[in-house]
Amino acid sequence: MRTTVPSSGALHFSTRGEYGVRLMVELARHHGGGPVSLSEMAEHEDLPRPYLEQLVVSLREAGLVTSTRGAHGGYELSRQPSLIGMAEVVTALEGPIAPMICASGDTYPGELCSRSGYCTVDLLWRRVRDAVVQALESTTLAELTQSGPGHPSHPTPSGRDGRPDHHDAVLVTVRPLADRPVKESIVQP
Amino acid sequence: MRTTVPSSGALHFSTRGEYGVRLMVELARHHGGGPVSLSEMAEHEDLPRPYLEQLVVSLREAGLVTSTRGAHGGYELSRQPSLIGMAEVVTALEGPIAPMICASGDTYPGELCSRSGYCTVDLLWRRVRDAVVQALESTTLAELTQSGPGHPSHPTPSGRDGRPDHHDAVLVTVRPLADRPVKESIVQP
DNA sequence: CTCAATCCTGACGAAATAAGTCGGGATTAC
DNA sequence: GTAATCCCGACTTATTTCGTCAGGATTGAG
């Protein structure tokens, strides 16, 4: 229903990421037992099926799921859940990720950013980006499948130093690029 | 010109965050030498002044900057740059951060999320959120003010384990809530 | 006291993006 | 051959972002 709260929520992953991950978790649950149809998942997770159809395309193209067509067809994971890192999943859903102008890997020195040449803020954005990538990478689908309340271990999520204070949280929208293959944005005149 | 690339860029912080941080850096640079007017900064950073006027409101309300009205007025930092953590800045710009449905601090167990009760994906979103918060917290305004090319030390940005592979990056939009004071969602009846 | 430079306020509008819909085509089990 | 499924691409709608605008309130300088 769009259980999604109107828009008051804060940490807001675009629904592509959110639904897509849920879909993957669902697949992970049924892993081993044949393909699962989109309709099933849509109903079970209460998500619009036509929309999921869009999302799953990205997952298939990324080689994360395989599809079987025809009656009794559906989707299954192409690998074991424990071998699927969430960075790959999110990346697939949101696009191949072109680093933004001000946090592009190491491509620009920061030229385009603030014209005067002293664009040092990119340091910040890069740190954030790396932190996100690392958090995603260090989590596998398998971890998200442990059902119910009481998550067991917490296998060193990378925050090695203690409590994050839970502070005021920050609204984060992980949302890479669409399908654009990154590239030209760099060289093209 | 809104140096911002059309929209092909990837790591895209909402302009509120981006401009706002740049503005703060600018203030940090002139720290100590009286108030700086918005027009100056707008021109210097090539940003629309009327828009900055909006942003700076949030910064003022958050107590990060102080304003002097009248002729020769302007803004200055209310604290030393080294005492201003970027989490606070971004938080101020993007809103008080209401944790999203699926990553609200510890408020909901995950009830609203996927109705069946096995919403374990929130673990992922929480990790990401915490990672971001930590990355922001561990960076101060002062660090971003070191001008030019060649950032000195890299004072333990929290990524303690080595290279982040720079992998495919992920497009991240840090963008907390608007002005909504979060409020009721937690305690208020 | 007047004037110009500021900050301050709130409403408005245009453009981009996200979210979701729709109609139909291609495959395959039965 | 028929029903269930995946597959594809265009289309609509809703929300959000980004930015503008018009004016009011303060204050320093002459």
Image (spheres, coloured by chain):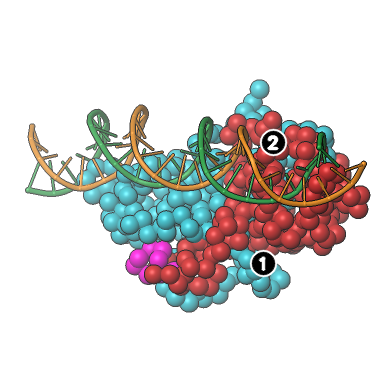
Chain colours: A red, B cyan, C orange, D green
The residue where tag 2 is placed is A48
Residue B165 can be seen, yes or no: yes
Q: Is residue B31 rendered magenta in the image?
A: no
Residue B138 can be seen, yes or no: no
The amino acid type found where label 1 is placed reads Gly
Q: Is residue A116 rendered magenta in the image?
A: yes
Residue A133 vs residue B80, the one in the foreground = A133
Compared across the picture, whether B82 is left or right of A148 comes to left
At 60% across and 31% down in the image, what residue appears? A6
The subunit letter for the residue under badge 2 reads A
At 61% across and 61% down in the image, what residue appears? A96
Counting other residues with Cα less than 10 Å from the Cα at mark 1, is it few (<14), some (14-19), or many (20 or more)? some
Where, quadrant-wise, is the C terminus of chain B in this rendering?
top right
Question: In the rendering, at what x and y percent does residue B48 appear?
Answer: 32, 50
The residue where tag 1 is placed is B159
Counting other residues with Cα less than 10 Å from the Cα at mark 2, is it few (<14), some (14-19), or many (20 or more)? some
For the record, the magenta segment spans: A110-117
How many tags in the picture?
A: 2
The amino acid type found where label 2 is placed reads Pro
The subunit letter for the residue under badge 1 reads B
At 55% across and 50% down in the image, what residue appears? B174
Give a yes or no on whether discs 2 and 1 share a subunit.
Answer: no
**Element assignment for label 2:** loop
Residue A10 lies in what quarter of the image? Answer: top right
